[in-house]
Each structure stands twice: as C-alpha cells, then as structure tokens.
Image (cartoon, rainbow, N blue to C red):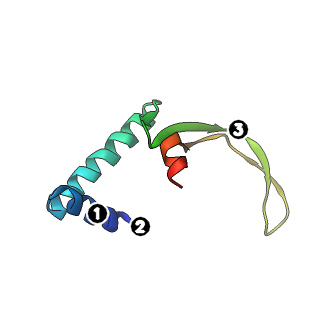
Amino acid sequence: MNKADLIESVATSTDMSKAEAGRALDAVLDGIAGALSGGDQVALVGFGTFLVRERAARMGRNPQTGAAIQIAASKGVGFKPGKALKESL
C-alpha cells in the first residue's frame, strides 16, 4: 500500500473526499515528524510507537577500494509495534 492507496482507504471509510483525506493524512504525518524531530516519541495505543534511535559511530569499508572509513554517529526513526498490531498479524 502506498500513500495514494492509504488516502483512498481513509476517504472511503470516513466519507471524506480524497482531498480532505490527503490533508488529514499529511497533518498526521507532519505531527509525527515534528514530535520526532523534537526528540519526543509518538505512541499510538494498539498500533505502536515511533521513536528516535541513536546509531553509534562505527568503522565501515569502501566496497570499491576496500579502504576502511569512519561512519559518523547518526539518528534514525524506529518503530515498535503494539500488542494489538502484533496479534493481528
């Protein structure tokens, strides 16, 4: 399922137009992204939790030359599924 399919599904199940459903989905995604960029986590009960995960600096290897390189520490987004989501699978 891609974003367009999700918008269509929301529009159908809520009797909204596709444009309204698209704006609603964009608002939800912007809210999640804003909370994560502020360092918070977003917990949707029954679905799961989005959180910021730290990746430590590490050594890597250039596949073309084989030379060792230092990969800097970074942050990434993690997702922990909720109990209800796990059980539905």
Q: Which residue is mark 3?
A: 56
Mark closest to the chain's N terminus, 2 or 3: 2
Is residue 83 or residue 10 the one in the foreground? Answer: 83
Q: Residue at x 34, y 48 (%)?
A: 29
Q: Amino acid at mark 1?
A: Ser
Q: CA distance from mark 2 to mark 3?
A: 32 Å
Q: Amino acid at mark 2?
A: Met
Is residue 33 or residue 85 the one in the foreground? Answer: 85
Q: CA distance from mark 2 to mark 1?
A: 10 Å
Q: Are marks 2 and 1 in contact (CB under 8 Å)?
A: yes
Q: Residue at x 83, y 67 (%)?
A: 65
Give the image location of residue 10, x and y in percent: 26, 58
Q: Residue at x 39, y 66 (%)?
A: 2
Q: Residue furthest front?
A: 87
Q: Is residue 17 above or below residue 39?
A: below
Which image quadrant for residue 67? bottom right
Q: Nearer the viewer, mark 3 or mark 1?
A: 1
Mark 1 Cα shell of 10 Å, populated few (<14), some (14-19), many (≥20): some
